[in-house]
């Protein structure tokens, strides 16, 4: 079989625009993420590194650490708070214990199109959330895209909720995700992403859900024969900086890092969207059996998940949910 990753070509990194920024001091940024070097997230980080190093004239050095080498999404965030790591870019979902409003992004089928997620994240709601998340030892400086999550499993094709009966599905460490899979009749288990490949390989869990690009870059197709294009949740990435590090950075460098984070987020969304369909095709070519659902089939999942909105309304805040649902 063709290796999926061999067929995937990353677009070239854009040129760096903008003037050099002069400020005093030498700084090092260790930037950690959970996904691998062949994903869109890492490609975004390479662009961030290029911008920051060129425009600071080498005074800020950026070192990239993929595949949760320095800890998974939660551990890396704690390391930022402790001041032992400078930057990370987790999914919002494992941070809901710290920032309860992030749970709104875990609501199923909230954003029918990625551009609707952009409008909310780059608009007033998203900017307010970045401000609110700039607390507890963190500075939140931008959004990126993990993307639409798709279901994979090792047992059989899934076309309707009944097909999930009893399937052991790994979820992110997030109660709303657990609620989603329980409501659909599956048997969900929260687990750190760092343990997932082995758990799938050893059959500790039957399935998992992540965007195509993560499925491919993490080689889950080697241990999962079936996938369903559910698009059930759109997960944002949030770019976080350690407040201890941030407070040591001269203001001009803070502005540079903020600007680079915005450019990284935009670029990363573009890469993720450009590659999404190509990667789905690569996965098919590699032998994965992918079920594409008709709008009617999607609606069966949607209808069954509507109670999740009611279950979570009070906790997330009804106004926030209504605000977003009005915009999409
Ligand atoms: O599945 C997860 O835990 C997340 O989607 C991932 C891949 C770690 C990215 O934040």
Image (cartoon, rainbow, N blue to C red):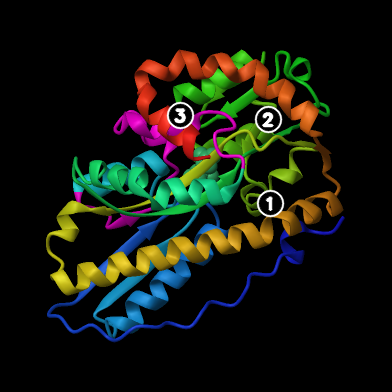
What numbered label is drawn on residue 207? 2
Residue 86 image point, x, y percent: 27, 58
Q: Residue at x 26, y 42 (%)?
A: 133
Determine whether 193 is above or below 32 in the image: above
What residue occupies the far front of the structure in this picture? Answer: 326
**Residue 143 is one of the magenta-drawn residues:** no
**Residue at the disc numbered 1:** 216
Q: Quadrant of the N terminus?
A: bottom right
Q: Is residue 76 left or right of residue 105?
A: left
Q: Is residue 140 left or right of residue 48?
A: left
Residue at the location (38% across, 34% down)? 102
Q: Are marks 2 and 3 in contact (CB under 8 Å)?
A: no
Q: CA distance from mark 1 to mark 2?
A: 14 Å
Q: Where does the magenta region start and end?
A: 83-112
The residue singled out by tag 3 in the image is 173
Identify the mark nearer the N-term, 2 or 3: 3
> How busy is the neighbourhood of tag 2: few (under 14 within 10 Å), some, or many (20 plus)?
many
For the residue pair 212 and 132, the one nearer the viewer reads as 132
The local secondary structure at tag 3 comes to loop
Q: Quadrant of residue 27?
A: bottom left
Q: Secondary structure at mark 1?
A: helix
């Amino acid at each position: 079989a063709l290796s999926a990753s061999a067929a995937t070509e990353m677009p070239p990194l854009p040129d760096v625009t903008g003037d050099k920024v002069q400020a005093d001091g030498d700084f090092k940024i260790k930037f950690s993420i959970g996904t691998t070097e062949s994903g869109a997230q890492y490609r975004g980080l390479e662009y961030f590194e290029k911008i920051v190093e060129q425009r600071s004239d080498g005074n800020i050095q950026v070192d990239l650490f993929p595949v949760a080498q320095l800890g998974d999404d939660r551990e890396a965030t704690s390391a930022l708070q402790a001041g032992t790591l400078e930057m990370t870019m987790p999914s919002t979902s494992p941070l809901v214990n710290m920032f309860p409003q992030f749970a709104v992004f875990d609501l199923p089928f909230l954003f029918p199109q990625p551009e609707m997620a952009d409008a909310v994240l780059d608009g007033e709601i998203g900017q307010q959330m970045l401000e609110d998340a700039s607390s507890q030892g963190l500075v939140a400086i931008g959004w990126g895209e993990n993307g639409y999550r798709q279901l994979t499993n090792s047992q059989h094709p899934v076309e309707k909720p009944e097909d999930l009966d009893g399937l052991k599905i790994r979820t992110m460490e997030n109660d709303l995700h657990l609620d989603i899979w329980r409501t659909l009749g599956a048997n969900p288990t929260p687990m750190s992403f760092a343990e997932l490949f082995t758990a799938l390989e050893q059959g500790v869990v039957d399935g998992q859900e992540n965007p195509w690009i993560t499925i491919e870059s993490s080689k889950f197709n080697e241990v999962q024969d079936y996938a369903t294009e559910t698009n059930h949740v759109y997960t944002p990435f949030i770019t976080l900086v350690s407040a201890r590090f941030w407070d040591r950075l001269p203001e001009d460098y803070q502005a540079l890092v903020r600007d680079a984070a915005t450019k990284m987020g935009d670029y990363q969304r573009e890469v993720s969207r450009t590659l999404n369909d190509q990667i789905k095709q690569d996965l098919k070519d590699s032998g994965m059996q992918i079920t594409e659902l008709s709008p009617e089939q999607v609606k069966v999942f949607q209808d069954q998940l509507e109670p999740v909105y009611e279950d979570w309304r009070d906790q997330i805040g009804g106004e926030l949910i209504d605000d977003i649902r009005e915009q999409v």
